[in-house]
Image (cartoon, grey):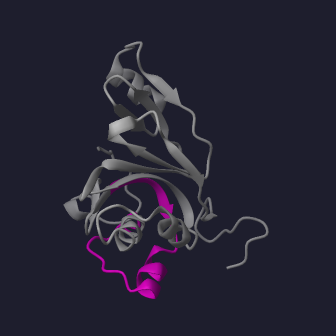
Amino acid sequence: MGHTRWRTRGNEFNNRNNHPIRAGIVIGTHNGTIYNADYLFRRLGLPRYAEVDSELIFRLADRFAPEGPIDQEGLKKALALCRGQMSAVLASRLDPGTITVLKGNKPLCLRIHRQHRVVLYASDDAFIDFAVDNEKSWRELEVPPMTMLTIRHEDVRAIENSEFRFIPQERKGTLPKGVNA
């Protein structure tokens, strides 16, 4: 799991703000901005380790992973409170063979190599193309927006997918039509 961060909040010289973000037993990367993160940290009584809004996603997942595996239904209900932009990849350190992918309203490209049981991701196809150097066995995973994937290492072909929701918001201070604060 790796990530190059375009800083929106939090000083990048404080390594707690850099991805992958660790929150309890959950670790992950996020592309986007959660505009109501400060409010949700307070409202939900979540601990805060870093200054970045991304930490909220992983704190929510940690809350729904008391025994190791992330409770996907609980996480989906919590994500519905978030307002902003997101695509993310996360896992529980107590269940490292299971990866949760959240494809929201930010770019997220996925490629799978079934023989090697590996999934790569990036915000742009060009990064993956460079990394795999045109090896033919990689296949693109088409994932529509607002989809949660669950990928298990023992069988990467048996990908579970379901819909998840949050409040998409392109810029701070603006809400989509038909959404009230």
Q: Position of residue 97 (x, y in %)?
A: 30, 46
Question: As displayed, is residue 108 above or below residue 16?
Answer: above
Residue at left 38%, top 25%? 113
Residue at left 37%, top 65%? 58
Question: As displayed, is residue 143 above or below residue 163?
Answer: above
Quadrant for the N terminus, please: top left
Whether residue 143 appears in this view of the structure is yes
Between 62 and 23, the one lying in front of the other is 62
Question: As displayed, is residue 118 above or below residue 83?
Answer: above
Instruction: Name the side, left or right, on which 148 lies relative to 96.
Output: right
As for residue 50 lying within the magenta part, the answer is yes
Specify start and end residues of the magenta stretch as a single range. Answer: 28-55
Whether residue 14 appears in this view of the structure is no
Q: Position of residue 136 (x, y in %)?
A: 42, 12
Quadrant in the rendering for residue 82: bottom right
Q: Position of residue 120 (x, y in %)?
A: 37, 34
